[in-house]
Image (tube, helix red, strand yellow):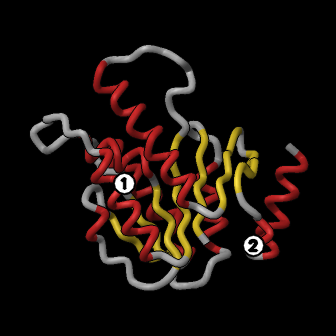
Amino acid sequence: MKILLYGGSACGKSTFAESILLSMPEPRVYFATMRPWSKFDLERVERHRTLRKDKGFGTIERYRDIETAELGAGSILLEDLCNLVSNEMFDDEGNYIDCYEKVERGLSSILERSENIVLVTNDVGADGSIYSEYTQSYIHTLGRLNIFAARSCDIVIECAAGMPAVIKGDISLLDRSLSERVIDMVRSA
């Protein structure tokens, strides 16, 4: 089962993604892509590690080059595509790189090698604003990769204000208790 969760910032998609992963077969792996640049980032990463500690997730921390990541067997939560694109867009010296093809290859590789995966991404660019050249490139690249991921996944779920909406696929294919919770959340939205 391949699932894409997308939505705006702080909309509940990460919590929901973990719920989905917990319904999938073990072993379960949290594939973290956030590259910590500051003390705040390091504190956030540590907080996330603490939150996951008792959930039985293994962890892969990989900021770039996901195509060559050792995955092993099991179910994967890749959190998130936004950080990965940001990491790949600039080299260590800050030089811009057109990263679309590289990230697409990496996603293809992980999707092919994973029986069960939950991809998390943000919906960016919906505000219609004009940004700097690099920000516009980021929005465009992430948008194209979101389209690629949505086409590649069995189920696509949009999260908004903690409420999931199924955009593509049949959630009854998920674990029964999880699919019932999703159906209840969608109906009550």
Residues packed near mark 2 inside 10 Å, few (<14), some (14 to 19) or many (20 plus): few
Residue drawn at (64%, 47%) of the image: 12
Residue drawn at (46%, 74%) of the image: 29
Q: Which mark is residue 29?
A: none
Look at the image and tell me in which quarter the N terminus lies: bottom right
Residue 9 in the figure: left or right of residue 19: left
Q: Quadrant of residue 144?
A: top left
Q: Measured from the top left, where is residue 104 in percent x and y? A: 36, 54
Residue drawn at (56%, 54%) of the image: 151
Residue 163 in the figure: left or right of residue 180: left
Residue 30 in the figure: left or right of residue 160: left
Front residue (pair 38, 160)? 160
Q: Quadrant of residue 18?
A: bottom right
Q: Measured from the top left, where is residue 21 in percent x and y? A: 60, 70
Residue most extreme to the top: 130
Front residue (pair 117, 109)? 109
Q: Which residue is mark 2?
A: 173
Residue 87 in the figure: left or right of residue 75: left
Q: Which mark is residue 104?
A: 1
- Element carrying mark 2: helix
Q: Measured from the top left, where is residue 91 in percent x and y? A: 15, 43
Is 27 rendered above or below residue 105? below
Residue type indicated by callout 1:
Glu
Residue type indicated by callout 2:
Leu
Look at the image and tell me in which quarter the C terminus lies: top right
Circles 2, 1 touching at the beta carbon (< 8 Å): no
Residue drawn at (49%, 71%) of the image: 76
Is 27 rendered above or below residue 101? below
